[in-house]
Image (spheres, rainbow, N blue to C red):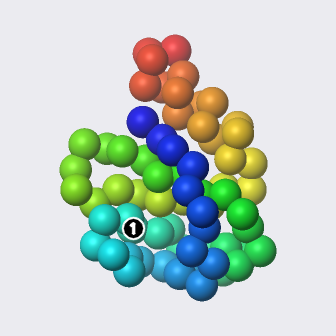
Amino acid sequence: MTRSIAVRKWRIWGSGDLVRWWNLDARRPRKNTALVIDVGHRVRPTITPDDPDAVQRILAERVDGG
C-alpha cells in the first residue's frame, strides 16, 4: 500500500525516475518523510504530508475497508 522513502529534497513536482510522481510541495526541502502510494500501476503517487503517520493510518483504514 504505502511505504516511506528518503525524500528527494529538491524534487518539488513531477517525476525524475518515471516511477514516482511527486505532488506539488514547495516545503518538501524541509521534510524528511515521503509516502509512496502503490495504486497498482507503474507510476506511483508520492506525497510528503505534514503528518505522514496520520495519512498512512487513514490510507490503511480505507484500504482495509475501515
Give the residue at x 28% y 60%.
43
Image height of 42 relative to 37, above or below:
below
Q: Give x and y (percent) for residue 16.
A: 38, 80
Q: Residues within 10 Å of mark 1 (few under 14, many from 20)?
A: some
The residue pinned by badge 1 equals 21
Q: What is the quadrant of residue 48 in the picture?
A: bottom right
Work out which residue is located at the far bottom of the displayed protein and give it: 10
Q: Give x and y (percent) for residue 10.
A: 60, 84
Q: Nearer the viewer, residue 58 or 20?
A: 20
Image quarter hosting the N terminus = top left
Q: Nearer the viewer, residue 20 or 55?
A: 20
Q: Give x and y (percent) for residue 8.
A: 57, 74
Q: How many numbered tags mark residues here?
A: 1
Disc 1 secondary structure class: strand
Is 31 left, or right, of 44 in this rendering?
right
Amino acid type assigned to the residue bearing label 1 in the image: Trp
Give the residue at x 35% y 56%.
44
Q: Nearer the viewer, residue 61 or 3?
A: 3
